[in-house]
Amino acid sequence: MDIDCESLITGFKGRRLLLAAHWDVDGICSVVKMRRILDVKHRFYTPPIGIYDIPWEELTGFDGYDYIVVMDMALPKNTIDRLDNLAINRAIVIDHHYHPEKGNAIYIDYPMENGDNFYSNTLLMDDFFHLEHDILTVLGIVGDYYTKVKGLEIYKLVEQISSKHDLTFEDTYRLTLLIDANHLTNDREAVYKAAEVLEDNLDSLKTLLNYDEWVGRLDAVEGEINGVVGEAAPSNDVIFHRFNSRYYIISKVGRKLTELYPGKTIFLHNTGFSEEYDQLYIRVSNDRDLLPLIEEGLRRGFICGGKSNVAGFLVPKREVRDFIGYVWAWLEK
Ligand SMILES: [Mn+2]
């Protein structure tokens, strides 16, 4: 780490900041946390849902900021370099994810004492800025870990802080689902609005459990996921399913199908996500390593990512057929 908390806060005083953050609960909570640390409502930017990069045509809106602060998002190295050039002062990355290739910026991305990544970006922020954990921290953790948080040593704290807000763990969990319904419905404006709604209601979070707009979105998302999962027909080793949804639900569908059909490979194709791209998703349960497939996607210039057992791709429509053929051949190898 090449900067300390005090000099960063001093540097931010009176300056124009752009807060570029992930569209999920942890990203939104990081933005609200940063605004509260500095007591300034700095602008929030999030990329188009599903695109883990900033489209070059949107960078025109990045002029005139003293600092561009990237939170909870591992952007490509060359994008970080461009942000550092665009900022009058510097680009600063505050992120609990692993960065294989760092750009030219100030990085605050150190791990916890035990060497693991922080459970959430909000938790990393608390550590760096010497803050007491609060409900934003908790929402970030639960947003990233779902109910698996129950197995972490931090779960006690999650419950304690939730109860201060008159929330059970189930309430807090539901709140993260409600907030995430904004990006799952593939609606960037709704994500921006969610940050405002959350910030304005930090003292009455329980009421947000009945916030009609979010409840409606969550119902719509769950209905859509169940619909798509219900259509997928079990087959031999690989369950291939093509569907048409505007929503950003492909990985949720994949996870549900894996629960329903353990041991099978899940291969999904969403033709309805955007005008330009189709989504592809592959999840394996055997010890097959998907990283070479992700590398092939990167080689073809696709936006893609994943781990050894799961891979997601955004493929330009005219290249989808060919890449699906490649994936089939690869899976059958
Ligand atoms: Mn996160």
Image (cartoon, rainbow, N blue to C red):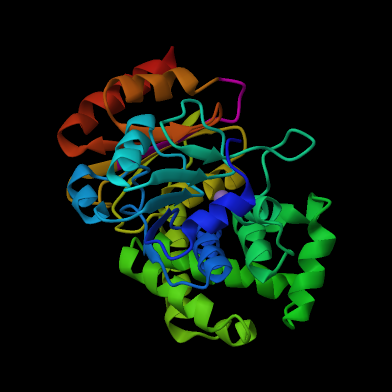
- x%, y% of residue 258? 57, 42
Is residue 310 magenta-colored? no
Q: Quarter of the image holding residue 65? A: bottom left
Identity of the residue furthest to the top in this view:
333
Residue 19 position by quadrant: bottom left
Taking the spot 78% from the left edge, 56% from the top edge, the residue there is: 150
Q: For residue 221, what is the image quadrant?
A: bottom left
The answer to whether 16 is drawn above or below residue 252 in the figure is below
Q: Position of residue 226 (x, y in %)?
A: 47, 61
Does 145 appear above or below 300? below
The residues colored magenta run: 279-288
Image spot of residue 321 (x, y percent): 21, 30
Depth check, front residue: 90 or 256: 90
Q: Is residue 173 left or right of residue 244?
A: right
Is residue 120 visible in the rendered structure shown here? Answer: no
- Is residue 150 among the parts visible in the rendering? yes
Query: In the picture shown, does residue 312 fall above or below 63?
Result: above
**On-image quarter of the C terminus:** top left
Residue 223 placement (x, y as % from top left)? 44, 67
Q: Quadrant of the N terminus?
A: top right
Residue pictured at 68% horizontal, 57% vertical: 126
> Measuring 46% from the left and 39% from the top, which residue is drawn there?
74
118 or 185: nearer the eye?
A: 118
